[in-house]
Amino acid sequence: MNRALEMILTGIVMALTAPVLIVAAILIRLEGGGSAIYRQKRVGQHGNEFEMLKLRTMVPGSDPVGIGTVVGRDDPRVTRVGRWLRRTSLDELPNLVNVWQGEMALVGPRPTIPAQVADYTPHQHRRHEVRPGITGWAQVQGRAGIPWDERIELDVEYVDNRSLALDLEILRRTVWLAATGQGLAPD
């Protein structure tokens, strides 16, 4: 998707979701204090690191306890509001700021943490040929229900076949999944 179209869509989505973001931020602060925004180093296009923004869904100071640690549905570090945000994927709304700044795209491989990238093969590094996305081919194929290696293969498949038509199809599927709640939160 070209950058001008992406900026228009991002601006529209930011305007439409601003009230939800404000309410979510207030609920996060009321439930547990601390910042409503969580910042984490991620790896983007060409292997460049950036700070990805998300709504905080865990109690303050609860960074994941290991590389690739899956945060399950009953993880005690996840707050009540955080469970709802994760289930609906609303915790990703601040990623729109990353898109606006050019660090991410609306569609592309999800950015990963530097420790995971250190173990990539040259083939797997191909996912960094494009900007990482808020949603992507792997997310609409099953998200956390897909094994990690398969997700990376789907990301490389996206890099090889990206087009405006594919991006629009991924966005269509993402909206459907978000509206129905199917396949969004890991079990």
Image: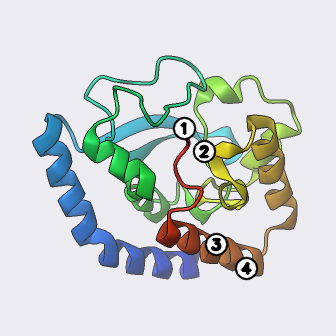
Front label number (3 vs 2): 3
Whether residue 54 is visible to the viewer of this picture, yes or no, is yes
Cα distance in 3D space between marks 3 and 1: 25 Å
Element on which disc 2 rests: loop
The amino acid on which the numbered mark 1 sits, given as a three-letter code, is Arg
Cα distance in 3D space between marks 2 and 1: 6 Å
Question: Mark 2 touching mark 1, by CB under 8 A?
Answer: yes
> Which of the image's four quarters has the N terminus?
bottom right
* Residue 118 spot, x, y in % from top left: 71, 24
Residue located beneath label 2 in the image: 111
Does residue 33 appear left or right of residue 131 in this picture?
left
Of the two numbered discs 3 and 2 on the same chain, state the one appearing first in sequence: 2
Front label number (4 vs 3): 3
Of the two numbered discs 3 and 1 on the same chain, state the one appearing first in sequence: 1
Q: Residue 173, which numbered label?
A: 3
Cα distance in 3D space between marks 1 and 4: 25 Å
Q: Residue 42, which numbered label?
A: 1
Binning the other alpha carbons within 10 Å of mark 3 as few (below 14), some (14 to 19) or many (20 upward) gives some
Residue located beneath label 4 in the image: 164
Answer above or below: position of 175 versus 140: below
Question: Mark 3 touching mark 1, by CB under 8 A?
Answer: no
* Residue 83 spot, x, y in % from top left: 36, 44
Of the two numbered discs 4 and 3 on the same chain, state the one appearing first in sequence: 4
- Which residue is situated farthest in the top direction here? 65
Question: Mark 4 touching mark 3, by CB under 8 A?
Answer: no
The amino acid on which the numbered mark 2 sits, given as a three-letter code, is Pro
The amino acid on which the numbered mark 4 sits, given as a three-letter code, is Leu
**Residue at the spot x=50%, y=63% of the render?**
181
Q: Nearer the viewer, residue 153 or 7?
A: 153
Answer above or below: position of 13 versus 56: below
Of the two numbered discs 1 and 4 on the same chain, state the one appearing first in sequence: 1
> Which of the image's four quarters has the C terminus?
top right
